[in-house]
Amino acid sequence: MYALLAEGPEGSTAVVQLRHDDGKPASDARTVALAALGPAVQKVEDAHHPRWVWERTAKWYPLLLSAGVRVEKCHDLALCQNILLHSAFAASTGYNQRATPLPPETDPVRHGLSPAGQQAGQDSLFDAPAANPATAAWDLATVAGELGAQKTAVHSSTHPARLALLLSAESAGALVAEEMQYEGIPWREDLHRRLLNDLLGPKPINHDRPEKLEALAGQLRTALNAPALNPDSPQDLIRALHRAGIEAKSTRSWELREFKHPAIEPLLAYRKLSRLFTTNGWGWLEQWVRDGRFHSEYVVGGVVSGRWASRGGGAMQIPAQIRSAAVADPGHVLIVADAAQLEPRVLAALAQDSAMAAAGRDSEGNNTDLYAGIAAQGFGGDRSMAKIALLGAIYGSTTGESGRLVPQLARMYPRALNYVEQAARAGERGERVSTYLGRSTPPVSQEWLDGQRSSSAQEQRRAESAARSRGRFTRNFVVQGTAAEWACCWLAELRRRLRALPPTPPGAGGTPDPGATTVQEAPHMVAFLHDEVMVHCPLGMVDDVTRIVHESSRAATELIFGTMPLEFPVNVSVVQCYADAK
DNA sequence: ACCTTAGGCGCG
DNA sequence: AAAGCGCGCCTAAGGT
């Protein structure tokens, strides 16, 4: 059963209609005031457990969440369209001609704000074809029509089961992302402020540098004999370094570390603290942390490979330096789970390289560290060497230690290396490559193709460089993108199992107090970083959630790859504080 | 008064 | 220890 949700004919309303799986209406279209949408959706959810179909999850779900409503499943038409428009699996289905152009992204629908009055936002990811730009939000008929077109595209594609799984995982991911944003990461503002005070000094008034940062700038100016130096200006800085006899080509930290000079230490210290101050300092705290929660915004499918991106506050770039401020509420813990060596394992699965798969198991068949296994098979037991080699193969290294180690890997695992090599060659020719479930690279631009046909020697070199660069991109795309699909399925399976858990008993083992009004605590996913998920979990449910995290990993692997002699083990840390994970 | 690009660095 | 993939955020600097 589907439940279609779209904007109503007049402002401040929505329209809901049930449809059977064949698309036939199962109820009349009902117009509901936005103020009453939460209860209305809850009623339909309880009665039918439908798949909610809407233009974008990011547009509709925040309103439902703030009304206390969570739905089981959805179909996000915008995200699915974005996949189908590019997917090589659906290239000959005619979907591209039938797809309805999407309206530009808008702010989420809110109670009290007319949808028609919303400001149009950026729409770079979901650009409608220029010839037929849509402006108005989709009505019910458009939602129904687009759903039909997408279902037809999947069924007539070259891999219907894989594409169907990809679209449902992407849609489930969209629900997870909005729920994570809504919950936020537990954040101890007091601890964060203490950290800033210890490292930087008191919060500066006006736009001054904090005390300790200014002191380091002073030391740096003295050491370089440059009294007017602005350490934030790379140009200014490189000139001062050259005058002091430091012949660095850039001012990057890793390069400066090679030089012995009294200016280097204060400069590196300044860099580190300056980053903390500008990116994760008092301003960040005031902008992104409210009521003890860090609320950022996830952008599902925001990366070409299908990975999520984030917007505002940097939810996926929280530096180790401040993770000590992410602390579970009293009576709770953070369960931090990450998939071990996800991308190399994905490569072994994609290429069906049984030799590489065997490197991730011991003689009894238990999962072991894949890098260590590879090191034992061919790098004299040196794990870091094996890791550099394997990442080099996935990224396309040609120089340095990494590039030198790749040939050894190619002798050990010809199937795996051949798989990424084929992806690279296809990319160099300007072809499209696809993940296992069918997300494909965007087509090359006309400029790229024109460049490949260039004549002069200089243009030729540029064209070859561009081809190699695209080859590295497509080589990495198949692995990174399939890893993102695995992670998305993992999240979806985890979400389903968390929802199915019985709530924590209010009393510790005793009979529930019938008159109790206490809110029953449930575990919530609060962060996701490509191959790592964080659950804020009541103490009484740690064992359940830990078990579920592992089960979900196995379920995701089977969903995507079926039965296979390779697992995707998950490392789980149960901690008070994010800094203690791993 | 904005907008874009480059340099640098945080994360996976 | 090295510089190969994907991002977001901040500042400086140069453009319109």
Image: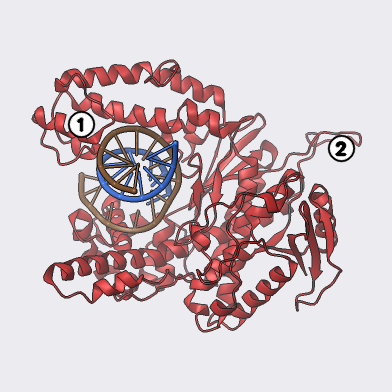
Chain colours: A red, B blue, C brown
Compared to residue A120, the image places residue A187 above or below, namely: above
Label pair 1/2, CB-CB below 8 angstroms: no
- Badge 1 local density, few (<14 within 10 Å), some, or many (20+)? many
Q: Is residue A70 left or right of residue A404?
A: right
- What type is the residue that disc 1 sits on? Leu
Q: Is residue A65 left or right of residue A102?
A: right
- Identity of the residue drawn at 64% across and 77% down: A149
Q: Residue furthest left?
A: A245
Q: Is residue A456 left or right of residue A559?
A: left
Q: Secondary structure at mark 2?
A: loop
Question: Can I make out residue A424 in this image?
Answer: no
- Identity of the residue drawn at 68% across and 50% down: A117
Where is residue A195? Give x, y as percent. Answer: 46, 22
Of callouts 1 and 2, which one flags the residue occurring earlier in the amino acid sequence? 1
Where is residue A368? Give x, y as percent. Answer: 42, 55
Separation (CA) of disc 1 from disc 2: 69 Å
To which chain does the residue with label 2 belong?
A
Tag on residue A88? none
Snapshot quadrant of residue A560: bottom right
Where is residue A422? Give x, y as percent. Answer: 32, 75
Q: Which residue is mark 2?
A: A511
Q: Which residue is mark 1?
A: A237
A448, A405: nearer the viewer = A448
Where is residue A398? Give x, y as percent. Answer: 21, 61
Q: Residue furthest right?
A: A515
Q: Is residue A539 left or right of residue A10?
A: left
To which chain does the residue with label 1 belong?
A
- What type is the residue that disc 2 sits on? Thr
Q: Secondary structure at mark 1?
A: helix
Compared to residue A128, the image places residue A527 above or below, namely: above
